[in-house]
Amino acid sequence: MGLWAVLCISITAHAEKAEWVGVCPEPASCKVTSSTYQPLKKVSVACADEAALSWAKKHLKEWYGKVGPEVVNASRSTADLGNEAYDLEVTAGEVKITARTLQGVRYALYSLRQMAIPQRGTLQVEGWILPQVTIHDKPSLDFRGIHMCWFHESKPWEIERLIRLAAYYKLNYAVVESWGSFRSDVAPWYGWPDGSMTKKELKRLRKIADDLGITLIPQINVFGHATMSRGGAGKHAALEFNPQYQPLFEPVNGWNWCLSNPETRKLLQELIVEQLEAYGNPPYFHIGCDEALPPSCPACKEKPYSQLFLEHVQAMNETISSRGAKTMMWHDMLLQRGDNRWNGFYANGTAETAAGLLKLPRDIIICDWYYGPAHKAYPTIDYFKEQGFHVLACPWYDTGGIAAQGRYAGKTGLDGMLGTLWHHYFGYDLVDDYFTLSNVAWNSESSFSMTGAHYGEFFRTHLRQIGWDMHIKDSRHAGIYYHEVPPEPDLRN
Ligand SMILES: [Zn+2]
């Protein structure tokens, strides 16, 4: 079902529609005060953080060049505004931006950019105009993340575009899972030898992300998914070219790490530290832990596997905590498969791992993934909250499901959302995923009023603006697909 149909159903019970002026995600409050467009001549910024004024000057110049507005400092009270909130008022002579933090100013300017259009009637751009509005805006959820995969086939420019898009749509975290692309110095054999996720490239992306207001989070799968390759592909990013390292992995396909081998734990701890450093010591580290298989080596079979698993997670968590970061992990191995309470949701653990959950430190953030259609309630989310964990709702693909999980997160006071893209980072899935996630994570009561305004077309405009920022010169780097007519069957789906 398309987004439009799903949202028609899901929005009817929610708040009245804000007037939509092209801003995505939809602001908490937006009023058009006059239908006459005003020239973008002067922007005044009121913000306690001195960095905000220079950020505004730098980016307005980047976006609008010589015909951009004058940027001046202003003094207005920010006492009523939260950390990421902003007020944006467009009047006849001036655009007024008021925010407590640089992040709030960034968000105000992203909104401004989405509203402004070139002045009419000239051959080339000679100025900018925008509607007269009053916007009061703030996010519903503190953690608004997206999980993206850096596959062996992924190009750095694709990842950069996803990061820029996430920031532009007011998400504030991006988990970047390396899928064998990371070039490790600790273990150069750990990953494909021609992976494009070099430390130099990461540094470049981090600089962009920091500037745009989004924090990158590393991920290594420390349990299952040790192949660092999509299951269906049947590849192993470490073992194909390095069979000597087989003792570190379970014999069946090398899918799980061998948890009873002390060398495994030592290596993973070193790899975690290496990636934390490569990411500039971010506040979170994702250890995966979904969809593991039963053990297949004699040593792992000998000991209660759940015990091994728990000790392993605790050891990883200690390493991460010792570097001042918090552990994130997928939820499914912590729920017993077949337990009726989780019918219709994802549970891949055993009675032992489910019992072991209770022994895990409560500072671990549980990433509860669910990719199906909308539900009224999410019992797995409730359960982890009851047990005292921080929980993120992690939807994918199904736009009705993404919207419903966001509404549930807002209603139940959840810590946030971590949307996922997996291998669907092109085409309409890219559009729908980003659009729905950002709207509901920013404003869990969003009316999705822009759905009536061909949001896909606006998305393409926003993507084009990002292409300008990236100075793209290759037609394949534009739009939502590489090609207008695919040269071969699309193998991504
Ligand atoms: Zn083993």
Image (cartoon, rainbow, N blue to C red):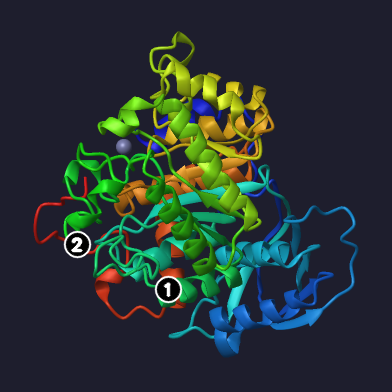
- CB of mark 2 within 8 Å of CB of mark 1? no
The quadrant of the picture occupied by the C terminus is top left
The residue at label 2 has a CB less than 8 Å from ligand 1 = no
400 shown above or below 363: above
Q: Nearer the viewer, residue 182 or 4?
A: 182
Q: Disc 2 versus disc 1: distance between alpha carbons? A: 33 Å
**How many numbered circles are shown?**
2
Question: Where ligand 1 lies, by quadrant?
Answer: top left
Residue sitting at x 25%, y 46%: 230
Q: Position of residue 398 (x, y in %)?
A: 39, 34
Indicate left or right for 482 with 174 as reference: left
Q: Nearer the viewer, residue 283 or 482?
A: 283
- The quadrant holding residue 282 is bottom right
Tell me the SS state at disc 2.
loop
The residue type indicated by label 2 comes to Glu
The quadrant of the picture occupied by the N terminus is top left
Q: Which residue is mark 2?
A: 484
Residue sitting at x 47%, y 76%: 204
Q: In the image as oriented, which residue stretches furthest toward the bottom?
A: 66
Residue sitting at x 31%, y 62%: 181
Q: Which residue is mark 1?
A: 199
Local packing at callout 1 (Cα closer than 10 Å; few below 14, some 14-19, many 20+) is: some
